[in-house]
Structure formats: C-alpha cells, structure tokens
Amino acid sequence: MAELFGIALPNISLRFFILLHFLLLPYGGWGTASYHFMNYFLLATGIWTIIQKEDSTLSLFYSAFLSVSIFNDIMLLIFFHREMEGSNGSFSVFISVLVILLKLPNTVYAWFEHQRRSGESSVSGYTNFDSDVSATYLPDHISPPAPGVDM
C-alpha cells in the first residue's frame, strides 16, 4: 500500500485512471492541436504502460508525460479559454478542467507504480560512487579490486 505524507492511499489501478481519461478526453475537445496531441499521446503511453507490466521505463515516461501534460493543459486553458464561447465551449473547458483534476492523482499513482516496478523505495536510486565496492554488486565479468590497491 502506497503512502503519501504518512497517509495510506487506496489501492487504485492505473487502468481506472486510463479508462476515465479515455472516456472524458473526446468531450474536452476545444480546438487546439497541442491539447489533442498531448492528451492522445498520453493516453497511448498509459495503455502501453498497462500492457508492459514489468517495464519501469514506461512507467517513468508515463508519470513524466502526466506532469508535462498538466502544465500544457493549464497553459492552453490560460491562453485559449476566451476563444471558446457558448454552451459547447463552456462544457469543453469544464471537461478539460476535470481531466486536469484527474491527472493530479493519476500522477501520484503513476509515480508509485514506477517505484513498485523499479524496486525503489524512498531512496534516490543513484549509486554512491564514493562507497566501497563489494564483490556482490559487480557483474560476473569484472573481478573486485585486489586488497591494498589504491584506485
């Protein structure tokens, strides 16, 4: 079970978020090609992430694309919301805001999915190169340094 700031999050699958995104995306079509391209690309990346269950790189791409698409959608709403007038435009902007609000928890769950797939916990995942190298962490074709040899 994932925790965020000490609060246990419910176990929700990424499939739920992808399905909601898939259902809401056609109704948020308010014109700009950038909005459609980013969101359909995000939807394709999310489906690919669900299909490839063990690939941690895809889950990282998906969480990064979610973060970028939230910023992209907010900027597009700021600059182009005045072009949408009438009831259809207001409905499209409303659905676009709902999609943005859906992307926020989706980003959190995608990040936890990436941590689960990559085996990381709360550590950074980077190797400390100043630490001692033990023979258990070396590949089979590399032998550990001889004792007393300064590298």
Image (tube, rainbow, N blue to C red):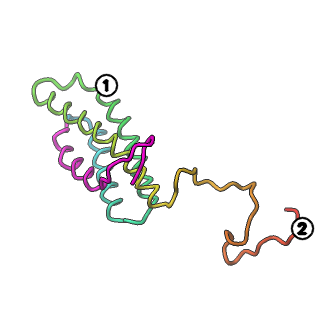
Quadrant of the drawing holding the N terminus: bottom left
* Disc 1 crowd, CA 10 A, few/some/many (<14, 14-19, 20+): few
Residue 108: quadrant of the picture: top left
* Disc 2 crowd, CA 10 A, few/some/many (<14, 14-19, 20+): few
The residue that appears at 19% across and 38% down in the rendered structure is 29
Which region shows up in magenta? 1-29
The residue that appears at 27% across and 26% down in the rendered structure is 80
Asked if the magenta segment contains residue 28, the reply would be yes
Q: Which residue is mark 2?
A: 148
- Residue 50 position in % (x across, y down): 32, 61
Q: CA distance from mark 1 to mark 2?
A: 65 Å
- Residue 104 position in % (x across, y down): 34, 40
- Residue 24 position in % (x across, y down): 19, 44
The disc label shown at residue 79, or none: 1
Q: Give left or right: position of 60 versus 137.
A: left
Residue type at numbered disc 1:
Phe
Residue farthest to the left, as pictured = 87
Q: Nearer the viewer, residue 109 or 67?
A: 109
